[in-house]
Amino acid sequence: MSDSQQDYSQLNNSEPRSKSSTIDLVNKNLAKRYRAEKRFRFLGLASIGFGLLCLVFLFTDIIGKGHSAFFQTYVQLEVTFDADRLDITDLTDENQLAMADYQGVLKAALRERFPDIKSRKDKRDLYKVVSSGGGFELRKMLEADASLLGSTQMLWVLADDDIDTYVKSRGDNIDDAFTGRLSKKKQEVVEVLIADGAVEKKFNAHFFAAGDSREPELAGIKGAIMGSLYTLLVTFSLSFPIGIAAAIYLEKYARKNKFTEFIEVNINNLAAVPSIIFGLLGLAIFINFFSMPRSVPLLGGLVLALMTLPTIIISSRAAIKAVPPSIEEAAMGIGASKMQVILHHVLPLAMPGMLTGAIIGMAQALGETAPLLMIGMVAFIVDVPGGITDPSTVLPVQIFLWADSPERAFVERTSAAIMVLLGFLIVMNTFAVWLRKRLERRW
Amino acid sequence: MIEQPISGPTVGHPLVDNAKMSMRDVNVFYGDKQAIFGVDLDIAENQVIAMIGPSGCGKSTFLRSLNRMNDTIDICRVEGTLKLDGQDIYDPKLDVVPLRARVGMVFQKPNPFPKSIYDNVAYGARIHGLVSRRTELDEIVETSLQKAGLWNEVKDRLDEPGTGLSGGQQQRLCIARTIAVSPEVILMDEPCSALDPIATAKIEELIAELSENYTIAIVTHSMQQAARVSHRTAYFHLGKLVEVNETEKVFTNPDHELTEAYITGRFG
Ligand SMILES: Nc1ncnc2c1ncn2[C@@H]1O[C@H](COP(=O)(O)OP(=O)(O)O)[C@@H](O)[C@H]1O
Ligand SMILES: [Mg+2]
């Protein structure tokens, strides 16, 4: 850039020269200018390349670690739905169904499968091959089909996370296996099962259908997804209308004076405030002052609405500013009132920009962790929330919680949860782009 | 540029008997800066008055104060008496919405709404609640487009975007949109400056036709245009109204030397 500027000034300042020498000078500098231009372009290309490289690295790492979480190890067992052992006399009795000892039935099936294991210690190891939640499946089956009671079925039963880790790390080569806490006895049992073809990795539907759990094989992401959705719902329905109303007022109604200037500066300041401060604000105002319950999406949504509001106001104002004044003049020139000008012309034309800003704000809110930690959304919550007042957690906090857990199985779940979060972000951003295109394409 | 002190009142005949709008001692300020100095002018009913003058002399400013478009500029202040049919249009009790329906405006750059051709023309009628049935609205759209000389060109594609028309068609669409609310006065601020000669000729023809039923004030930088379309011509210079006369007189035998200097192209 500076090269070419120099050239021009040289040309301008110089005494009138003969035509050929001016052309010579231009030609001489031309090569230099082209080189500078090439360097400039290369610099841009290199930056993009670097960015892409980082992205590829990130994705390979996360997908490499997390993809295995989408599959879970099951063991095949011959299970007898023994009415006595289950202690069920009447299948219509909810209570009996709930209290039945399904895990006992699984234990019996394991004992039958490995009759040689006799000592108490070894048996305890044996029982731990299946997940402590593996029996829930049996209950569901019984509820669906009463005739199963008393019958014997070949079933795939959810394996314990240690077994899962072992099987996944083992692959086809027994020497690669990660044994960790796995005792010799358990390894033997698993090897026997593998040799029999009674161990299989199946799609982990449970991961998308359950809430959090202390047992990695039972832990799912649905609680966090629903929590995030409810939180974003609250955030959006508060910050979008408020943000647009504020932007319209500031752009179209507020007179330019010291007070509006002050407000403007502070909106920009708010956009730069670290998000954890909003968490503290929420803690002080909503929990301590208004005594709202902790850990609920309503509260999280309020705090995140405060946080995204400046972003939405700023982008909405930019969108409103970008509406050509000639359109507004045209409407006013035939007698539209100010409100009609805004509702009929400014808002429709500014809407794509506003929505884009709002969705970017929502994406920001979706990935936010710090303020939610301050208002107790970091709690361990097993149930999938059913509304904005149910205790819940959100995706990034779930990632934070799992990343903190020592079990190997939680490591892959952490990466899987990151993939889900990134997936949502990509979907939201794509939606923003699509929406903008669609709304703009009208004319 | 000839720097000549402009002193004394407006020469010629700024006042008429059959005034549709009459302005007395109008001063317009942008903040501390004065843009219009003590203008007295009448606009005669069903006539075209052209406003000419070097750029920056306040033609647009004056025109925009005739339907209070200047209200939208925060720092702009209008003083003096401006009357439409004897009624003060700056009366604080007066609502600008009906005023702007009576005094419509066509702008320099064609500015159709990013809506269909139909909706562009129908917009004014809709917001003012002029019609209750769709057929009436259809009729308004058709007659307005016909008056604007655009009907034959667009009748088959009324639901296509107005922004897809050519520049000249867009400007005629804007005129149709203005006509659709049946204004009494139409203000035009250099309506042809963004158009090619053929489109300009069409608009000029249209202005001549419209002047039978409407009172028109047109700002133009083209003296030929002023000469072709207007009955009276007002010459502005540095915010002052220098001369108002019959158009023919202004262009053949102006009373003021500044006017003469301008029309003979000595500055502009
Ligand atoms: N919105 C505005 N704010 C401040 N000054 C303005 C504004 N619009 C016009 N002016 C000033 O008023 C004077 C007259 O402008 P204008 O009416 O646009 O002239 P014309 O239309 O004759 O070219 C100019 O000096 C211009 O700088
Ligand atoms: Mg102008």
Image: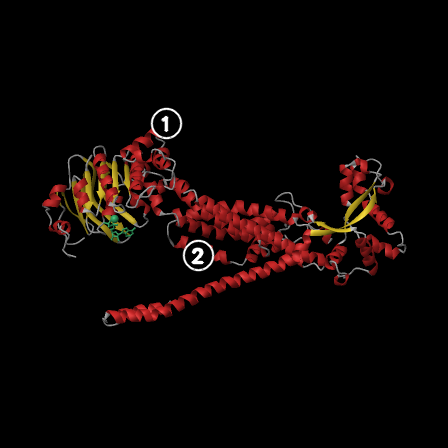
Foreground mark, 2 or 1, reads 1
> Which amino acid type is shown beneath numbered disc 1?
Thr
B104 w.r.t. B37: above or below:
above
User: Visible in this render: residue A342?
Assistant: yes
> Which residue lies under the disc numbered 2?
A265
Q: Mark 1 lies on which chain?
A: B
Quarter of the image for the N terminus of chain A: give it: bottom left
- Asked if marks 2 and 1 fall on the same chain, the answer is no
Q: In this view, does B101 lie above or below A6?
A: above
Q: In this view, does A313 lie to the left or right of A93?
A: left
Q: Is mark 1 within 8 Å of ligand 2?
A: no
Q: Position of residue B132 (x, y in %)?
A: 38, 28
Q: Position of residue B43 (x, y in %)?
A: 19, 39
Note whether A22 is above or below A195 in the view shown: below
Mark 1: which secondary structure?
A: helix
Residue A117 position, x and y percent, is 88, 54
In terms of secondary structure, where does tag 2 sit?
helix
Q: How crowded is mark 2: few (under 14 residues within 10 Å), some or many (20 or more)?
A: few
Alpha carbon of mark 2 to alpha carbon of mark 1: how far?
A: 52 Å
Residue B228 at what x, y percent from top left?
17, 41
Residue for badge 1: B135
Of the 4 image quadrants, the one containing the C terminus of chain A is: top left
